[in-house]
Structures are given as structure tokens and as C-alpha cells.
Amino acid sequence: MNLMRKVIFDINISIDGCCDHTKFNPGHEMYDYFISLLRSADQFVFGRKTYELMVPYWPDVASKNSGDTKAENEFAQAFVAVDKILVFSRSLEKVEGKNTTIARTGPQEEILKLKQQPGKNILIGGLEILSQLIGTGLIDEYHFVVHPIIVGEGRRLLSGTSLHENLQLKLAETTVLKSGSVVLRYVK
């Protein structure tokens, strides 16, 4: 039996589909959720924009213990503990850290290779990567943290992406946070 690693896409999203992280106010409960998710993985896969949002910000917070809250500092430590980062970009010239690699190809072939290697979960972050992978069947789980806010502007989930057929998912878990945010975990 060939057990492949799980590929998990996770994102914060408003009720109206906005995925702009600056519109949300994360609390310790949400950080706890993401810390647990990070600890289940040993590989991140980002597009350039998401990578540049995450690095060097979280490594800097981790090295200086400079988060505004204990939860932010713990998240930063969990972020830097992940073994490898793969960034898909045709324009990025260099990356930080010896554990980070740039891929110049499309993500489908690389993700398939990663799934077949031994290890923990692979976390996918970023709207561009999602739009390129959603129709491939390579994403095993989708985690949406739905925030109780209507934003009315900003980047939307799958905006401009067309699927050849509907992607039917099964709700595997629902967690309601005290903040009113809801974590939805779907499997294919």
C-alpha cells in the first residue's frame, strides 16, 4: 500500500469570500488552530506573493520574540520549525533561508513528486497556487477559517478561475471559535 502525504490548502476568508489577511483580527484561538496545523506539516508550498507576506515577517518575529501576543510568538516558532519551503515564482530572484527553494515550473508536477516522498503534511498557501491546483485532484483537504465579517472588497477566493467540473467535497470537521470564526475542514 502506497501512503502519500496529504496536501492541505488553508486560508482565512470573510463571509463574502474576501481573502485579504489585513481585514481579519486573529485571536489566540485562531493562532492555536494554525499552530496545530503547522505542526502537522514539514513542507510549505507558496506562490511568490504569499511567500513575501510570510517571509521575512514570521522568521523575524520568531528570532526576536517580537509578536504582539504570546500566540503570535508561538505561531512564529511553529512557522520556522517547518523543514522546507517551496516557492513557485518566475520573477523572484532570491529567497531567505537554506530550507527554501524556488521552483520555476508549474506546481502540478512538483506537488505530485512531493506527495510521493515520505514526510508529514504539505501545506499550500496562496490564491495563485490554489487556482493552478484546484482542478488537478492533488489537494486532499481544504481548511477555511471563515471570519464573521463582510468586507465588500479585496481579492476573492478563486476569482477568475474556471473549473471544468464541480469539485464535490465532504465536510469532515467544523470548529466554532469563541470569536465567531468557523473552521471548516473539507476532504475530497
Image (tube, rainbow, N blue to C red):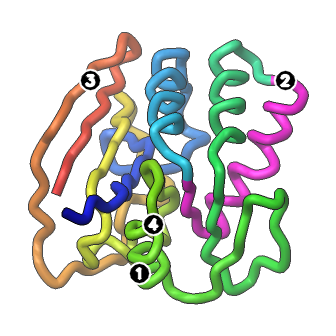
Whole-number angstrom distance, CA of label 3 to CA of label 4: 31 Å
> CB of mark 3 within 8 Å of CB of mark 4?
no
The residue wearing badge 2 is: 66
Please give the name of the residue rendered at 63% of the width and 18% of the height, measured from the top-left corner: 71
> CB of mark 2 within 8 Å of CB of mark 4?
no
The residue wearing badge 3 is: 175
- The amino acid type, in three-letter code, at marker 1 is Gln
Give the magenta part as a residue range. Answer: 43-66
Please give the name of the residue rendered at 45% of the width and 66% of the height, measured from the top-left corner: 117
Nearer-N-terminus badge (3/4): 4
Disc 4 crowd rating (10 Å Cα; few below 14, some 14-19, many 20+) is few
Disc 3 crowd rating (10 Å Cα; few below 14, some 14-19, many 20+) is few
Closest to the camera, between mark 2 and mark 4, is: 4
Q: Is residue 159 magenta?
A: no
What is the number of the mark on residue 117? 4
Closest to the camera, between mark 1 and mark 4, is: 4
Nearer-N-terminus badge (1/4): 1
Whole-number angstrom distance, CA of label 2 to CA of label 4: 35 Å
Q: Nearer the viewer, residue 64 or 147?
A: 64
